[in-house]
Image (cartoon, coloured by chain):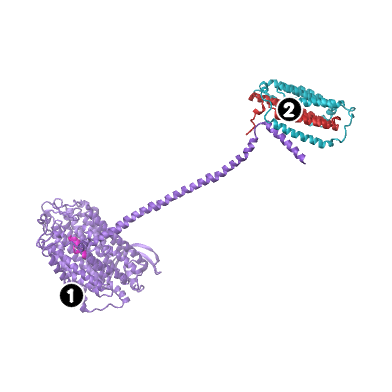
Chain colours: A red, B cyan, C purple
Amino acid sequence: MLYPITTIHYLVLSAALLLIGTLGVLARRNIVIILMSIELILNAVNVNLIAFSHHFGKVHGQIFAIFVITIAVAEAAVGLGILIALFRNKETVQADEIDLLKW
Amino acid sequence: MTDAIFFYAFALLAVGGGVLMITRRSAVHSAIWLIVSLLGVAGLYLLQKAEFLFAVQIVLYIGGIMVLFLFVIMLVNLDEASRQRQFNRQWWIALAALAAVGVEIVYFLKAGGSAFRLSPPEAEAGAAGPGNTEQIADVLFSEYLLPFEVASLLLLVAIVGSVLMAKKRV
Amino acid sequence: MNFLDAIWLIPLFPLFGAALMLLLGKKLDPQAASTVMRAPDMVEEPDDHAHGHGHSYEHGGSHDHGHDGHGHHHHEAASRLLIKLFCPGMVLLSFIFSVGAVVQLAGKTEKIHEVVKFTWLAGLPFHTADGRIAVFGADWGFLLDPLSSVMILVVTGVGFLIHVYSVGYMAHDGGYYRFFGYLNLFVFFMLMLVLANNYALLFVGWEGVGLCSYLLIGFYFHKKSAGDAGKKAFIVNRIGDAGFLIGMFLLFAVVGSVRFTEVNQTLTSGRFTAETAGFGILSATALLLFIGATGKSAQVPLYVWLPDAMEGPTPVSALIHAATMVTAGVYMVARSNALFALTPETSLIVMVIGALTAILAASIALVQNDIKRVLAYSTVSQLGFMFMAAGAGAYWVAVFHLFTHAFFKALLFLGSGSVIHALSGEQDMRKMGGLKDKIPTTFRTMFVGSLAIAGIPGLAGFFSKDEILWQVFSAPHGSTAVYAVGLITAFMTAFYMWRMMYMTFYGDSRVNPAVAGHIHESPATMTIPLIVLAIGSALGGWIGVPKLWSFMGEGFRLFEHWLEPVFAAAARAGAAGHGEAAHHDTTIEWLLMGLSVAIAIAAILLARRKFFHGYTPPADTTLHRTLYNKWYVDEIYDFLFINGLAKGGGSLMARFDARIVDGGVNGAGWMTRFISTLSIWWDVWIIDGFVRLTSFLVRLISYPVRIVQSGYVQAYALVFVVGVGLVFGYYLMR
């Protein structure tokens, strides 16, 4: 099972990365770490896409991955901008101290 | 054989980097480990014969985004934060839920894994013919032209947005 | 000149006099104030009117020219002379015209003459009770027939004599012009009453004499008792007038006209049958008219004003309350004889009330001490006699008694006025006595008058009273019981009259010594009318001699024959429904005549025995007290009507208003508040309750939902993941 590396291995890897990233999003208090965990999730998705692209021999998956990266970039930039703004206003980067979006 | 070793090596880098990333106290350490993880992922891309993406991953992701992250980490004073509690109060539940989801995913993969045996990879037929980059360019600028343009627009918006967000006085 | 066509002038002469007096009199009479000059030693009876006593006013003059003598008459202006001449002169003119008119009427075959000046009230046609079309019309018209001719002669003749008497009597009082003005006004209204040719104009006169009665009774208006007496007279009269008016309206509705000629024609035409079976609409009409007569002519129950009316000056009492106004009721009943003949029930009521009044008033007169009160109750009693006669169907007898009564009652009143004048205002008989030599003319004339009223044969009263008693006994509608009552009353009449005479003129003098020195006979202007009236009382009866005495010749039965045409129709109508008049035994008639004479003489002798030698106060028994207090009738009226009806009704109305009307209003307010309270409850608990229930439910439901929204992003993310897990789980399960 371990030896001939098939697509499944990549999928499992992708799933693992996904779960790790999600855990980071859910469990960490520091917003910077959360944002980085989001990047990890996006990478997991990319791995999945590349694996399938390779499996089918087509290049479309990679193009999709390019777009994902693009989006990740934009999102990281904006997210960090928001972080900076948030830090300026609330002097904190801990996620559970920011609970303004509630009733 | 070798590709297996490489695979596991890069996989280890990726997963291990990820795990270490989410557990570090210092944000800079977490960023470094994320870089490691991304390197691992880049290596995996190479193994999958996605050279262009390998390059993009390193240049863009690590060289751009992670640098950006590091800048921001240094901009935002995180000394205070590193002394506080790192994990929030719901990490138990998160872990349990994710474990459950993980189990489910594994089960899906095991149960549906036979669906992938449709045809083995077309071996090295791609050695001859256009290279990976050309292929990508081919499809990107013909079939996916519109999304390309839209993506650039999105980037524009993101630029404007982040500049605006980061300004002290609007 | 044609006096018959000038009968409309007869009332106008005194009207002219009255207008002149009342409009200009103040300027003419220098002594215009109505203060009464009191004698220095005035006796202190509260309802006495003091009589000023100037020494200088005693001399006689001619009865026309008052007493302008010498001495201090400075304030006797010539204008007073004008008043003294003018007003009696007006009445004299009326008398002359009346005599002329009557003489000319006697010359006519059809003894009726009507002069219509103009149409006074014209109305629209309408349906009477039995469906005929009638038009209401009342003219300013004058009717002269035998009945009204008797009346105008009495009114103007006696009125003239009393005016002359007043010239002397009222000389000391203030308000001379006012007195004569009112007196003339009264004569005007009385003449309108008797000369009217329809009920409406009669009513004008009727009301007018009531007004003048009020004015004259309250002549001494500064005395409260006089004002009260005037008011009492007017109000009691008014009650009767209400009955009269309704009766007049009913009459019009039933018969269709108010003119006398038309009414009599309709009633005797046979269209209406006599209501012998019971009380019908005609009886009701007649009864209502009679109620008016009870008010005006002082019968039970509306007689209470007449004794109080003695507050007025004595000439007023003589003219109005003896000779003329009170006889208006009798005149009206006589005028409506056609109606009364058709209604035996009402005629019975008339007779019974007449009898009741007669005996009631006579009983009260037995014990009165004020000389004028005795005469007042005597008047009421004699009026009762007149109505007894009218009720029995003998209308001419009633009018005859009216005629004779005018003479002797006026005489007695004027005589009593002379006595009072002589005694400087004393009216209480207990303080009189032994005056017969001191005021001889007054004594002799009053002697004649008292004999007349007692019913001594030969004098006027005998003929009329005896005829009444005979008719009551023997007429088809008469009754023996009423005759008995009449006989007893005759006895009482003679008794109290002679009690008065003896107490006043005979025996030892009980006069207050201070007053005794001034006793003097009245001036000629007062004594001459007395003499004239005495002659009338003595001889006036000889024109109405009963049928029994027809051996004396028909000329002595002038009165009955003169009035026949007026009452013949009624007599026919009555007789037609009832068979013919009964013929009674002449023996019984002689017997009854002798009986009444004997009774009169017995009464006089009894009075002589008790009072000839002086007056002893009677025993204070219950009977005496009841009679003295007028059977407490005034007190009963006060209790029933004044306190009961007026005040009680007023307080009842006040309580009704406060409790029920205001209670209703308050109740409405309370109801509004109560309903608003309910409304408030509904609004607060039900309406608002729904609203609050809604919000409560929302809050209830939203509470758990709210908790979910913590604002904590990672919690949301966790929910994502859990959701993903669940979705996978779903597919897994499948």
| Residue type beneath disc 1 | Gly
> CA gap, disc 2 to disc 1?
160 Å
* Residue C50 placement (x, y as % from top left): 17, 54
Task: Give the residue at mark 1.
Answer: C594
- Going by the numbered disc 2, the residue's amino acid type is Ser
Is residue B162 or residue C437 the one in the foreground?
A: B162
Q: Name the image quarter holding the N terminus of chain C.
A: bottom left
Chain ID of residue with mark 1: C
> Which is nearer the eye, C292 or B103?
B103
Count the marks: how many?
2
* Placement of B56 over or under C656, stated as above or below: above
Q: Which residue is mark 2?
A: A37
| Residue C78 in picture, x, y percent from top left | 16, 53
Which of the 4 image quadrants contains residue C132? Answer: bottom left
Residue C385 is inside the magenta segment: no
Task: State the extent of the magenta-drawn residues as a range.
Answer: C363-374
* Residue C615 left/right relative to B62: left
